[in-house]
Image (cartoon, grey):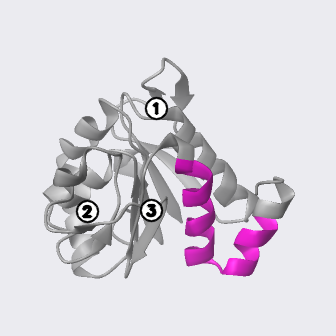
């Protein structure tokens, strides 16, 4: 199971695109609200009904936990103690985590990116806290995958498919979407 975390003010393009691509690849993914309510509003006023509330998700044992960015969504993710505790436990056990846009900041603040290559929304590189900033659409370093922003959401989703399944599965989804 892949959990895609939703906090008030999440970036809609990043969350919905990633969930859609993973499902097209037949990867089980559930959206998870950290807001105490299944109805979560994005940073551009689009509301989404999450599949689960945080208390229903097994974050430490999930196949992967994905953090979409957006503001104030990223700040709200960072202030969710059960989520940050689970991310630290996952990192300690080298279990996959992924973050896009501003959300790599959450991993940086927790020390998860220290010594790794990572990317983030342009201008926020200082938030990578000990990582080597890389100006690429998607960066995979060991069990951590980071991406730059809404415009890289397709590449990010495809990278997650390649990581979780294989490159062939990612290519099949890419071709089916006519994404070049």
Mark 2 — residue?
Answer: 86
Q: Quadrant of residue 59?
A: bottom left
Mark 1 — residue?
Answer: 38
Q: Earlier in the sequence, mark 2 or mark 1?
A: 1
Q: Residues within 10 Å of mark 1 (few under 14, many from 20)?
A: many
Q: Dots 2 and 1: beta carbons under 8 Å?
A: no
Q: Residues within 10 Å of mark 2 (few under 14, many from 20)?
A: some
Tell me: 110 left or right of 162: left
In front: mark 2 or mark 1?
2
Residue span colored magenta: 152-173
Residue at horizontal 14 percent and vertical 56 percent from the top: 109
Residue 21 coordinates in the image, percent (x, y): 68, 55
Mark 3 — residue?
Answer: 136
Local SS, label 2: helix
Q: Quadrant of residue 17?
A: top right
Q: Nearer the viewer, residue 98 or 102?
A: 102
In front: mark 3 or mark 1?
3
Residue 178 coordinates in the image, percent (x, y): 84, 54
Q: Earlier in the sequence, mark 3 or mark 2?
A: 2
Q: Dots 3 and 1: beta carbons under 8 Å?
A: no
Label 2 and label 1: CA atoms lie apart by 20 Å
Above or below, 140 against 150 in this view is below
Do we see residue 35 in this rendering? no
Residue 5 coordinates in the image, percent (x, y): 41, 47
């Amino acid at each position: 199971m892949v959990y895609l975390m939703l906090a008030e003010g999440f970036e809609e393009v990043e969350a919905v695109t990633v969930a859609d691509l993973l499902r097209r690849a037949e990867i089980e993914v559930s959206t998870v609200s950290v807001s105490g309510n299944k109805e979560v509003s994005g940073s551009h006023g689009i509301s989404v009904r999450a599949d689960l509330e945080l208390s229903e998700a097994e974050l430490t044992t999930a196949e992967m936990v994905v953090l979409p960015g957006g503001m104030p969504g990223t700040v709200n993710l960072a202030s969710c103690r059960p989520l940050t505790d689970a991310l630290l436990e996952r990192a300690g056990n080298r279990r996959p985590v992924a973050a896009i846009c501003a959300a790599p900041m959450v991993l940086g603040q927790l020390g998860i990116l220290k010594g790794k290559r990572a990317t983030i929304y342009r201008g926020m590189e200082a938030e990578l806290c000990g990582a080597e900033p890389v100006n690429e659409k998607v960066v995979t370093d060991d069990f951590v995958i980071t991406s730059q922003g809404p415009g890289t959401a397709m590449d990010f989703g495809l990278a997650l498919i390649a990581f979780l399944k294989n490159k062939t599965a990612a290519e099949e989804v890419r071709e089916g979407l006519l994404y070049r």
